[in-house]
Image (cartoon, helix red, strand yellow):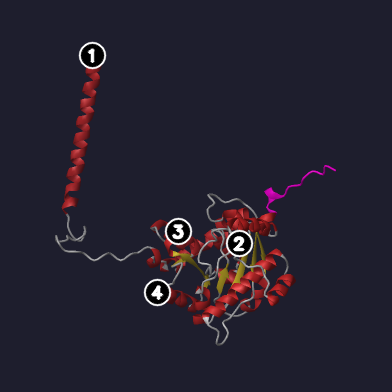
């Protein structure tokens, strides 16, 4: 027994010696690199000197210009026509209506840039819009995305820029830099998807529209196309850990231009009213929605002004009218017991 222990201890000592030798050799090889100075390493900073902060490259300052160049556009085309289309069909199974309202725009040569303004309930909304807009717009389409969510990390921002052609904007107040860049993109023929609500619905109902789409349309002279998406909130709404496949409906409205003398606030109210009417159309029919729109009685996207439990109760009844209430796993037939 003692001989075996002696042998094992001797072997361990040999292994340790080999490890020490390898470590010494590695340190010797790296020593010249450690001694290298500027420009191979950051320049030294004198003690007591306060250096200026490095400029941020995340959030609203994230650079996405590379995503609109030819190589990235080619990759994005493959992604959109392959994995994204398949994912949208498998998870959301969209029914599309209202594309005929864009015929006048599509017949122009070249096809002008437009601003798509959908409601926003789910992360599925952006792939849905990208997959359902006409190909003429999809070729040059930019998505305005929340800078603090999609561009807070380098890898996440690069993926969003490559797959969605996302552009970072602030949720509350768009900076002059972001606004000028978006205006430049629109002026050069890029269409834009921007969510006037500013973010996903927190409770399943809509939120009041902010004026970003109306402001950009007024400054560039391009039309706003209202879009209503029904059913996406029950598939992958805010707070859900994983998507639940279902059905959706995407309804495109007629283009809207800012009228002469109309300010941004009134134009924004008109855009919200148009999306509200499309929401009513998605749950009823075109004629009923238009009659209610003329009377100003379309059901509000923001839901009833009640407390939380009554809003949730009303939301359940509201969803039964749309695609969310027609999901396959919810179609149950109770037996007739006489």
Give yes or no for residue 111 being in the magenta stretch.
no
What residue is pinned by disc 3? 159
Residue depicted at 62% across the width and 70% down the height: 275
What residue is pinned by disc 2? 306
Is 15 drawn above or below residue 286 in the view shown?
above
Could you say where residue 137 lies in the image, as x and y percent from the top left? 57, 71
- How far apart are the alpha carbons under marks 3 and 1? 61 Å
Q: Which mark is residue 177?
A: 4
Secondary structure of the residue carrying numbered label 1: helix
Front-most of residues 14 and 204: 204
Q: Which mark is residue 71?
A: none
Q: Quadrant of residue 55?
A: bottom left
Give yes or no for residue 330 being in the magenta stretch.
yes
Give, as a single range, the part of the protein colored magenta: 326-338
Q: Mark 2 packing: few (<14 Cα in 10 Å), some, or many (20+)? A: few
Residue 112 visible in the picture:
no
Q: Which mark is residue 3?
A: 1
Secondary structure of the residue carrying numbered label 2: loop
* N-terminal label among 4 and 2: 4
* N-terminal label among 4 and 3: 3
Q: Judge from the rendering whether residue 283 lies leftward or rightward of residue 134; answer left or right.
A: right
Could you say where residue 204 lies in the image, as x and y percent from the top left? 59, 59
Residue sticking out furthest to the left: 47
Residue 5 visible in the picture:
yes
Q: Nearer the viewer, mark 2 or mark 3?
A: 2
Q: Nearer the viewer, mark 1 or mark 2?
A: 2
Q: Nearer the viewer, mark 4 or mark 1?
A: 4
Residue depicted at 56% across the width and 79% down the height: 267
Q: Judge from the rendering whether residue 37 lies leftward or rightward of residue 111; answer left or right.
A: left
Q: Name the main secondary structure of what is drawn in magenta.
A: loop
Q: Mark 3 packing: few (<14 Cα in 10 Å), some, or many (20+)? A: some
């Amino acid at each position: 027994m003692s001989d075996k222990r002696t042998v094992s201890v001797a072997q361990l000592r040999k292994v340790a010696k080999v490890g020490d030798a390898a470590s010494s050799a590695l340190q010797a090889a790296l020593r010249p690199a450690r001694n290298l100075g500027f420009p191979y390493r950051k320049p030294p900073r004198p003690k007591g000197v306060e250096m200026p902060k490095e400029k941020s490259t995340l959030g609203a300052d994230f650079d996405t210009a590379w995503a609109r160049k030819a190589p990235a556009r080619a990759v994005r085309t493959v992604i959109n026509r392959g994995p994204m289309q398949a994912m949208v069909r498998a998870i959301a199974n969209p029914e599309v209506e209202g594309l005929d309202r864009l015929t006048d725009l599509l017949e122009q040569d070249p096809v002008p840039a437009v601003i798509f303004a959908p409601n926003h309930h789910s992360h599925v909304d952006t792939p849905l819009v990208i997959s359902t807009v006409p190909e003429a717009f999809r070729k040059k389409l930019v998505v305005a995305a929340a800078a603090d969510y999609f561009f807070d990390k380098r890898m996440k921002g690069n993926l969003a820029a490559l797959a969605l052609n996302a552009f970072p904007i602030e949720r509350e107040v768009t900076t002059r830099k972001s606004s000028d860049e978006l205006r430049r993109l629109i002026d050069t023929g890029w269409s834009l998807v921007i969510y006037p609500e500013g973010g996903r619905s927190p409770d399943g109902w809509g939120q009041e529209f902010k004026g970003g789409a109306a402001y950009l349309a007024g400054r560039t002279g391009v039309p706003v196309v209202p879009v209503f998406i029904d059913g996406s909130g029950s598939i992958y709404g805010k707070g859900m850990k994983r998507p639940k496949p279902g059905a959706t409906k995407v309804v495109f409205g007629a283009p809207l231009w800012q009228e002469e003398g109309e300010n941004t606030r009134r134009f924004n109210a008109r855009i919200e009213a148009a999306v509200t009417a499309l929401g009513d159309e998605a749950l009823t029919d075109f004629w009923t929605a238009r009659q209610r729109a003329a009377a100003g009685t379309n059901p509000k996207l923001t839901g009833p002004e009640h407390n939380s439990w009554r809003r949730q109760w009303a939301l359940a009844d509201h969803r039964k009218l749309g695609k969310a209430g027609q999901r396959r796993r919810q179609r149950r037939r109770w037996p007739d017991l006489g």
